[in-house]
């Protein structure tokens, strides 16, 4: 196995943070209501027809409580609403309000502009290659066999 520099997951997190910080600063400069990175992530994880809080939490990789808090703060801002789930009387779906849909379209436009800015900095071909690599099918996550560390098991009588 070849030696690596910074692990790829950390590089991906750093890149995500770059986009989040740029987006938050742009929204603040435009005088738009401040939202947290968690709220922005939740907003992006929503399906158009609506998504349960449990599913949002799973997609975001956060606890249900964290997702619930972010949902209710965005409901308070008038960007999201809760509706009954037509497939289950016990569940509620979270979806964007019309104001939330407008805000989402604005953010998608800003993210495209940030991607263009990144292309100016590191090259369009690099950004396009990165996008192609990240959009390529990866299959299910593998489970690798971890080699034993330190040689034979002390219980082995050899």
Image (cartoon, grey):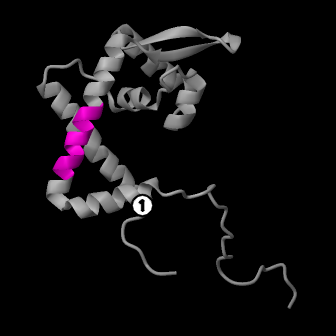
Q: Which residues are magenta?
A: 108-118
What secondary structure predominates along the stretch shown in magenta?
helix
Q: Where does residue 118 sit, x and y in percent of width and height?
A: 20, 52
- Which residue is identified by label 1? 133
- Residue 66 inside the magenta-drawn segment: no
> Relative to residue 128, is residue 112 depicted above or below?
above
Question: Which quarter of the rendering shows the C terminus?
Answer: bottom right
Residue 158 seen anywhere in this rendered image of the structure: yes
Q: Quadrant of residue 71?
A: top left
Within-10-Å neighbours for mark 1: few <14, some 14–19, many 20+: few
For the residue pair 3 and 90, the one nearer the viewer reads as 90
Element at label 1: helix
What's the residue at 58%, 29% (across, down)? 55
Residue 63 seen anywhere in this rendered image of the structure: no
Q: Quadrant of residue 33?
A: top left
What's the residue at 65%, 11% (across, down)? 86
For the residue pair 141 and 73, the one nearer the viewer reads as 141
What's the residue at 47%, 26% (across, down)? 46
> Relative to residue 128, is residue 97 depicted above or below?
above
């Amino acid at each position: 196995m070849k030696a690596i520099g910074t692990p790829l997951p950390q590089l991906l997190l750093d890149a995500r943070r770059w986009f989040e910080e740029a987006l938050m600063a742009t929204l603040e400069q435009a005088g738009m209501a401040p939202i947290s990175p968690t709220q922005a992530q939740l907003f992006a994880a929503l399906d158009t027809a609506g998504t349960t809080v449990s599913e949002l939490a799973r997609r975001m990789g956060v606890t249900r409580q964290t997702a619930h808090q972010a949902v209710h703060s965005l409901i308070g801002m008038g960007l999201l609403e809760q509706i009954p789930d037509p497939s289950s009387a016990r569940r509620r779906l979270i979806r964007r309000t019309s104001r939330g849909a407008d805000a989402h379209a604005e953010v998608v436009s800003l993210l495209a502009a940030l991607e263009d800015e990144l292309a100016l900095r590191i090259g369009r071909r690099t950004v396009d290659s990165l996008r192609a690599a990240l959009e390529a099918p990866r299959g299910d996550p593998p489970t690798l066999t971890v080699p034993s560390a330190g040689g034979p098991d002390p219980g082995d009588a050899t």
